[in-house]
Amino acid sequence: MPPKRQRNTPPKQQHTTDLENHIHHDINEMAAPGTSQTIKQCDKKIKQCNKKIKQCDHNVKQQMQQSQNGVECTIDSIKGTKHECSKTVQSDMNEINNTGKNMVKGTKETADKLGEDIKDRANQAKDVVANKANAAKDKLNEGAQNIKNNAGKGK
């Protein structure tokens, strides 16, 4: 009886592609919520900052209007308002910057963890392949031994 033909097995590249797709899915799944949340926080801070800038602008215009109406308004008071607004805006910008730094740090930690997970999965895949190769080798050796034994019986 002729030996059985081996079935076509999918190329190993397909397995690698599936593994890569799975890894990319995990990366997106883990990174997206943190990044999205941080972006929302930054957007919120920027909106608050814009509101404060508008309020400062309004205050300066109001002081200028009062000056036109005969109320004493000195350049110093306008400068004071401007300085106060600048400090507020700078404080908000520092907070936005720190939020961004925290996002980068969190993303790096996530990437490091994913790197470890990927390495673990690659090692597991390597072990599975090695085990299957050893099992196939054992079966081949067993088959070869059976052939030798059967050949010896035929004499």
Image (spheres, grey):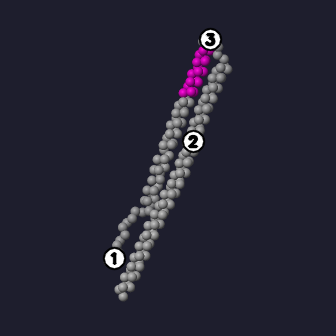
- At 40% from the left and 62% from the top, the residue drawn is 10
Residues drawn in magenta: 51-67
Asked which secondary structure carries label 3, the reply is: loop
Name the amino acid type tagged 3: Gly
Q: Which residue is identified by label 2? A: 102
Q: Give the percent coordinates (x, y) of residue 150.
A: 37, 82
Q: Nearer the viewer, residue 34 or 76?
A: 34
Q: Mark 1 belongs to which amino acid?
A: Pro
Is residue 14 depicted above or below 54 in this figure? below
Which residue corresponds to the image point at 51% horizontal and 43% vertical from the top-left? 34
Mark nearer the viewer, 2 or 1:
2
Query: Would you say 100 lies left or right of 15 here?
Result: right
Q: Nearer the viewer, mark 3 or mark 1?
A: 1
| Position of residue 92 measured from the top left corner of the image (x, y, whole percent) | 59, 32
The N terminus is located in which quarter? bottom left
44 displayed left or right of 10: right
Q: Residue at x 35, y 71 (%)?
A: 5
Residue furthest left as drawn: 1
Q: Position of residue 126 (x, y in %)?
A: 48, 63
Q: Is residue 74 above or below residue 21?
A: above
Query: What amino acid type should be assigned to the residue bearing mark 2?
Result: Asn
Up the image or down, 80 lies above or below 23; here it is: above
Q: Which residue corresponds to mark 1?
A: 2
Task: Kindly identify which residue carries mark 3.
Answer: 70
